[in-house]
Image (tube, helix red, strand yellow):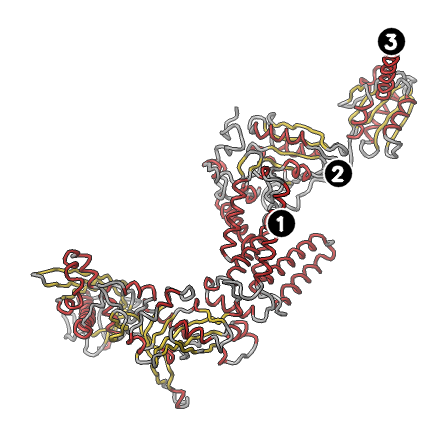
Amino acid sequence: MNNRIPKAKRNKRVIIILYLLISSTILSACEGTVGRREIEDLGIVTAIGVDYVNDEVIVTLEVVNPLASSISAQASSTKTEGQKYVYPQGRGKTIKDAISNINLYFDKKIFLSHSNILVLGEEFAKRGTIDLMDFFIRDSQPREDMYIVVAKGARASDIIGVKAGLGRPTGTYLYDTLNNFSSNGKSINISIAEKYRYYYDVSNEPVIGLVQLKEVVRSDDELKKEEQTAKVLDVAGGAVLSRDRLVGYFDGDEMMGFNFIVGDFKRGTIVFRTPVEDKDKKGTIIGADGVFTSLDIVSAKTKREITVNDGKIHLTIDVKLKAGLNEINQALDVIDEEVMTRIEKACSDKVKELISTTLEKGQKEFKQDSFSIGVTVHQQHPKLWKEIATDWNNIFPEITYDVKVETTIVKIGLMNLPANLRRK
Amino acid sequence: MAIIFLSFLAIILFIIVVKGEAMISKDIEVNKAKMKKIFKGSSDLVLYAFDTSCNTKALVAYIECLVDRNGLYNDLVKPLIKDLKSPYEILKTVPIAGAREVYDMDTITKEMLVGSAVLFVDTLDTAYLFELGKWERRSIEEPGNERVIKGPKEGFVEDISVNKGLIRRRIRNPNLVFEDYIVGTQTNTNVSLVYLADRVNSSVLDEVRERLNKINVDAILDASYIEQIIKDSPKSLIPTVGYTEKPDVAAGKILEGRIAIISDVSPMVLTIPKIFIENFQTSEDYYTIPKYATYLRTIRIFSLLMAVTLPGILVALKTYHQEMLPTSLLMSMASGREGVPFTALVEALFMLIFLEIIKESSIRTPSSIGRAVTVVSGLVLGQTAVQAGLVGPIMVIAIAASGISEFIFASLKEMIVLYRFIILLLGGTLGLFGVICGIIIIITHLVSVRSFGVPYMYPIAPYDKEGMKDFIIRSPLDKMTYLPRNMSNKKERMRNE
C-alpha cells in the first residue's frame, strides 16, 4: 500500500502530521481554545437557585472553593470556615443572562455540570416555569438528571446557603436527602428530564419535590438563645404543578399516599394504632388505645384497575404490602396468629386512609390528575381514552374509587415477645 | 596463434598459482608460512611443530582460546609422539571423534575459526581436522528478564551448541530439526532454525528461509540484529518477532508449530511467528491453575490499556470533560491544581519525560549507586514536586500507575512508550475524541499487521475457536486438543503421526 506513494511525498506527509501535532500542543496552551478549560479556573457549582422578583430573574449559585474544602487543606492548616462555599447572585432578563452577569464580578468560570439540585423559588414556580427553563435542557452544561425542587414558602436564595447537616454544601445535602426518599416515602425526587417528560403528557400533571426551611429548637440549656434554634432544610412533601404552574402542596403523609397510588413506594415506616380490645381466651391483652406500632414496609406493589359502568369510571387500587415489625409500644403477643392478623389489618386500614386522603385532596382541592390515573385509563381502555383525553381534568374529580390493601408481616424482628408483655 | 597459446599458458599458470595457494603442500614449512600469511601473523595463532614416533615431522595449528588444550595434548600430540607407526595411520591412532581429512586451505581456515585444530604432516599433501573446540562460556543461570516462581529456571547462554542442547533435552523427538546457516560477511555467525518437522507451517518455514538467505549484513552481534532485518513491516513499533531467554518457553512455542531462531553469541532465541496475545502470556501461566492464569491475563490486558491511555485520558478529562469526573474527585483535583503554573498537558508531558529519564538512569546506573538514584528520583521528583506546586498529586499517581503497568510488558516497551506520548498529545489537544481516534488508529494498525503471513490479532481477527482456548482464558492443558490453526500444518495435538 505504502509503496504506491512516492517517498518524498510520504516524508512530506509525516512532516505535516508532526507539525500539526506539535503546533496543536503549543496552541492548546493558549487562552480561548474552544472547549478547553483548566480545572483550577472553574467555579464548581453545587446548587442552583432561580427566583423571579420584580420582572427580573435572580440566579443564586453555590460555588465550592476547592482549596478550603478539600481534605488535604483541612488536614494541613486552619483555613477560614466562611471561605468554603460562596454564594454569588446574578440578575438578568433570562437565566443565561443572570449567570453570565455573575462572571462580571466573580473570577472563576461558572461550571454548572456538577450541580445536582435546582431550587425554584415559590414565586417563580407559581408564575410558570416552562419558558425560562429552556436553558437547563438546551445548554450542554447543566445535568439532565439534576433534581428539581420548589422552595415552599420561600425564595430559592433563602434556601441556598443554609448550613445544614454536617457542613456540606447545600446542593450535596439536598441531593442526598432527596435520595433518602427510597427509605421513607414522604418525598419525591424528580429530575429535569422527568419533569419534561411529564410536561408533554396530557394524562398526568407533575408532582415535584419540595424543600422547606424549618427552624428546629434544640433542647440544650447550656447553649445561648440564638444558638438554640437551628435552621434545617426539610424535603418532606411534594409540590403539585398544573403543567408548569405551582398550584399547591402535599405534605409528608399525603406524599406517602401519593407514592402508594403511583406505585413508587420503595421503603418506609407506617405508624398506626392497633385497636383496643379486651383480653382474649388465653388472657393476653391485645392492644391499648393511644399506643403505636411501627411497621417497616419491605416491598409495596400497587395494581390499578379501571372499570367502566354506564360511562362512569371506577378506579380500584389494590396494594399488596410486605412488612417487618419495627417496634411495638404495647403488650402484644406477636406469636399469636390472631394478634398478627389484627396488626396487619390495622396497618392496611392506615394505608387505606393515607391513600384516600391524598386522592380526595387531588380530586377536591386541585381538581386535576396528579396521579397519572389517566395513563392507566389510556392503557386499559384506549378507545374510551381517545374520547375523553382532552376533557380528562374535568372528568377526574368525578370518578369513584375504592382501595384494597393487604399487608403481610414477614419479619417480626429479633424479639418474639415485647418486654412489657408479662407486666400485666 | 602465438598469442592464443601464450594466453592459454598464462591461464594455466594462473590457475596453478591460485590453486597452489589453496592447496596443501607436502612440506610443512611451506604450510607454516601459508598459515601465517592467511592469519596475517595474528598473535593468537599457535603453530606447534614436533617429531612423531615414525620420524616424520608434524605441525599442529589452532587458534588459542578456541581449542581444548588438554584434549589437544593428551588425545592428539601424545599418541602421535608415542604410537604412530606410519603417517598413513593417523586417523587410526588418534582417538578423537569428528576427525577428518581435508584437502584445501579454505576449509581449514573456516574450521579453525570455529575451534578446530589442524594437523599437517610432512610428506602428505592432506591435512587432518580435529574438532576440539572449547571456550569460556557463562554457566546456565536463571534469566533476569523472565523470572518465574514456579517452573524451570534454566536460561539460554551465549553459546549455540549449549542452547541447542537445552531445547533438544525438552523435545526428545527425531522430528526436531536444527537447520544451520552462516550469516554476516565479517562475523560469520552461526544461526540455526529450530522446528518440529511434522508440525511446522511449511509456508511460514519457506518464508523464514527466504528471508534468512536474503540477509546481507557484515555483522550479527545479537539475535536482535536478525529480528530487525527479517521482521515484517520494519517501520512499525509492534513486535512481530518474539524472543525469549528460557528454553521451556522456546520449546513450548516450537511445539505449537512455531520456528525458533538461535543465533550464536546471543542468549536470546527468536520465535516466529508472533501474535498479539503472546505479549500477555508467560511461561508461568501454563504451570499454575488455569483460572488463576486467566485472572492474571485479564489484569495484564487492563494494565496495557492503562499504560497506553491513562495519562491521555486524565489530561482530556482535566481540560475538556470535567463533568465526567465525580464531584469530590474534581474538587480534590482542583485543589491540587491550585497554583500549578502549567496547563494539564504540559504538566503531564513534564512528568512523563521525567519518568523516562528516571527509567533510563536506573537501568544504566551501576548497582552501587542505584539506590541513590531511586531515592533521589522517588523522593525529590515525586514528593517535593507536588509540594513545590510544579505538578498536581493526581497527575503523579496517573503517570506512576502508567509507568508501573508498562514494566509488565518487556516486549511491548517501545510501543507503549511512544503510543503513550501520542495519545497524551491527542488527549491534550482534542480531548476524549482525540484519545478515541488514537486508540482506533492503533487497533487498525494491530489488525492489519501480519507476522510471517499470520495475522497479528489471531485468534480474534480472524476468529478461531481453538485459538481462543489460549487467549484471555487459559483452558486446562488437556482441553487444548488442537494446535493454533494458523501456526501449524497438523491440527491435532495429541496424535503422533
Pinpoint the chain carrying mark 2.
B
Residue with the most extreme top position: B1
Q: Which residue is mark 3?
A: B1
Query: Closer to the camera: disc 3 or disc 2?
Result: 3
Residue situated in front as seen by the camera: B113 or A271 = B113
Q: Which residue is mark 1?
A: A15
Pinpoint the chain carrying mark 1.
A
The amino acid type found where label 3 is placed reads Met
Q: Is residue A24 visible?
A: yes
- The CA distance from mark 1 to mark 3 is 68 Å
Residue B445, horizontal then vertical, whole percent: 54, 43
Residue A283, horizontal then vertical, whole percent: 16, 72
Query: Closer to the camera: disc 1 or disc 2?
Result: 1
Say which label, 3 or 2, has the lower sequence index. Answer: 3
Quadrant for the C terminus of chain A, please.
bottom left
Asked if labels 3 and 2 share a chain, the reply is yes
The amino acid type found where label 1 is placed reads Ile
Q: Secondary structure at mark 3?
A: loop
Residue A263, horizontal then vertical, whole percent: 24, 63
Q: Which residue is mark 2?
A: B137
Q: Secondary structure at mark 2?
A: loop
Residue situated in front as seen by the camera: B492 or B31 = B31
Q: Secondary structure at mark 1?
A: helix
Q: Are marks 3 and 2 in contact (CB under 8 Å)?
A: no
A184 sits left or right of B70 in the view = left
Asked if labels 1 and 2 share a chain, the reply is no
Q: Is residue A284 visible?
A: no
